[in-house]
Each structure stands twice: as C-alpha cells, then as structure tokens.
Image: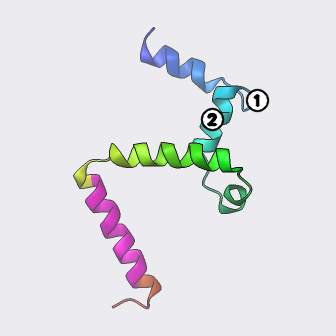
Amino acid sequence: MKWDEFKDMLSGLGPDTPLGRMVSIRSEDDPEILELFSPEQKRIRMEWRTRAAKDMSQEDMDNFLETMKQALIQAAGGR
C-alpha cells in the first residue's frame, strides 16, 4: 500500500476507534483537557512527546530553544 493511500484511510478514522483515541491523546494541546486526562492518557502522551523530541534535529532543537528564550525575555519585560 502506498503512503498516500494509507494516509487517506487513516484520515477517515473516527475518534471512537482505538487508533483514533490514541491520535487524539497524542495531539491534544488544550490545557483544560489535559488536566482531565487519566494517568494512562498522560503516560501515552508523554511517551509520544518524548519520542518526538528524540527525533528532533539539532537545528530544530536550537530554533525551538531560541524561540523559548525570546518568549521568556518578552514575558520578563523584554530588553
């Protein structure tokens, strides 16, 4: 099966399927919803985020850290 065909099949999955639930757990970013996650949902999300961070290139990591640095400078009143 070609990747495009596989992607099309995945996009049709609803949130009521096991894979759909897993995708929604991994991709959730709303702090209010994250507070309501069960310990198991939090574990699933953290494992996914940890894995994604390990796969990040050094350039992407440097860009992310610079963005975070600038955001913290602005939050502290800027320079």
Q: Residues within 10 Å of mark 1 (few under 14, many from 20)?
A: few
SS assignment at label 2 = helix
Residue type, numbered disc 2 = Met
Is 62 colored magenta in this rendering? Answer: yes
Q: x, y percentage for residue 12?
A: 65, 23
Residue depicted at x 67% and y 24%: 13
- The image quarter containing residue 32 is bottom right
Between marks 2 and 1, how big is the CA–CA gap? 10 Å
Residue that label 1 marks: 16
* Percent x, y of residue 50: 43, 48
In front of the other: 77 or 47: 47
Look at the image and give the residue range highlighted in magenta: 60-73
Instruction: Tell me where residue 17 sits by quadrant.
Output: top right
Disc assigned to residue 22: 2
Q: Secondary structure at mark 1?
A: loop
For disc 2, the neighbor class at 10 Å (few under 14, some 14 to 19, many from 20) is some
